[in-house]
Amino acid sequence: MILTTGGAGYIGSHTVVELLNANFEVLIVDDLSNSKKEVIDRIEQITGKRPIFQQIDLKDKQKTFELFQKYKNIEAIIHFAASKAVGESVENPLKYYENNIGSLLNVMLAMKEFGVANFVFSSSCTVYGQPEKLPVTEQTEKKPAESPYGNTKMISEDILKDYAVANKNFKAIALRYFNPIGAHPSGLIGELPNGVPTNLVPYVTQTACGLRSKLSIFGNDYNTPDGSCIRDYINVVDLAEAHVVAIKRLLECKNKSNFEFFNIGTGEGVSVLEIVNTFEKVNKQKLNYEIVSRRAGDIEKIWAETSYANTELGWKAKKSLNETLISAWNWEQNYRAIQK
Ligand code: UDP
């Protein structure tokens, strides 16, 4: 059985679908702080299989231990559960350290207590900051985090690294996500931002459906071909598949060291204006947008060197930007239709 913490969330739910499709038994633990229980029904609709669901807050050490006591057949854990709003983390850093580090420690302590060895961690390209040289490889130097959120990812990787040195039985893989976007092609699951979205693509889809009056593009005076920022946008289903590959690598003992980390991106840099133009073209929608000043804390450009993940994990992003932006729009429309 694979325990997915935060398995009802955006990346978690897509990964649970891929795990079930690969015939793994799945236990979802989620506190539903940023997700909805209906997601479990949707996962069942897509896969024909129902994952086990437990609503638990992993900050609660006793409840976490009781969970491992109850499910003795947990072979591996994918730890998605974390708060992820950069701006909120600046305003409320203790919430981020408590949630993201506290829950990680409780899960790792329970793993130690109950003899569970395999761990996949949701890390982020934020660990690289603004790199001097692009694309970034796994060897690119890490930079001090720009936000408490980013710092929790740095600290979490350090915790895994230190624990892996001290405990040879423990095996962990950190997946450094670039910018996950899009939704399952069924249109049944996707990103459900809380309140006003801060990420680009949910803001784009909510503008297209009339929920937001205008998209703000944060800056067109960067040192990039069209002046807007560049990111590496990875389809969420491709990203989900990387987790299945990582789990198999651990269970089949194919890992080369007991703490590994991989860049999970497409290897392509895409600008904000390219996202907007592609969205308009493939979905035949006109977006109301304006260029505004830069957003504090944004880096100018980043994209991944993915050859290590491609060769070593045998994983590669497959989906095009066109189909990814079609899936994002399809999801937004389906979701709004259900809400009515
Ligand atoms: N962005 C934008 N308008 C928005 C949201 C985001 O222009 O309403 C830009 C942002 O400045 C960045 C890119 O889109 O260059 C991706 O931002 P997002 O917040 O999605 O991800 P980040 O890379 O910051 O984690």
Image (spheres, rainbow, N blue to C red):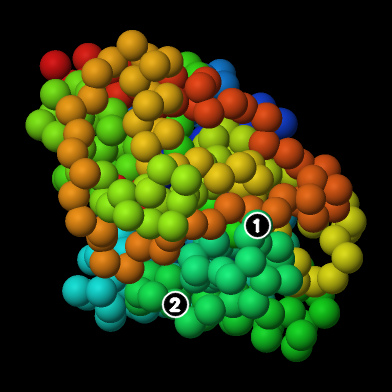
**Depth order, front residue of 339/231:** 231
The residue type indicated by label 1 comes to Pro
Whether ligand 1 has any atom under 8 Å from the Cβ at mark 1 is answered as: no
- Residue 23 to residue 140: above or below: above
Image-quadrant location for residue 62 = bottom left
Residue 135 circle label: 1
The residue type indicated by label 2 comes to Ala
Q: Is residue 61 visible?
A: no
Q: Residues within 10 Å of mark 1 (few under 14, many from 20)?
A: some
Q: What residue do we see at 70% from left, 54% from top? A: 305
Write down the residue under mark 2: 145
Q: Earlier in the sequence, mark 2 or mark 1?
A: 1
Between label 2 and label 1, give the one nearer the viewer: 1
Taking the image as shown, residue 158 lies to the left or right of residue 275, namely right
Taking the image as shown, residue 249 lies to the left or right of residue 29, namely right
- Residue 256 to residue 273: above or below: below
Give the Cα separation between the discs numbered 2 and 1.
19 Å
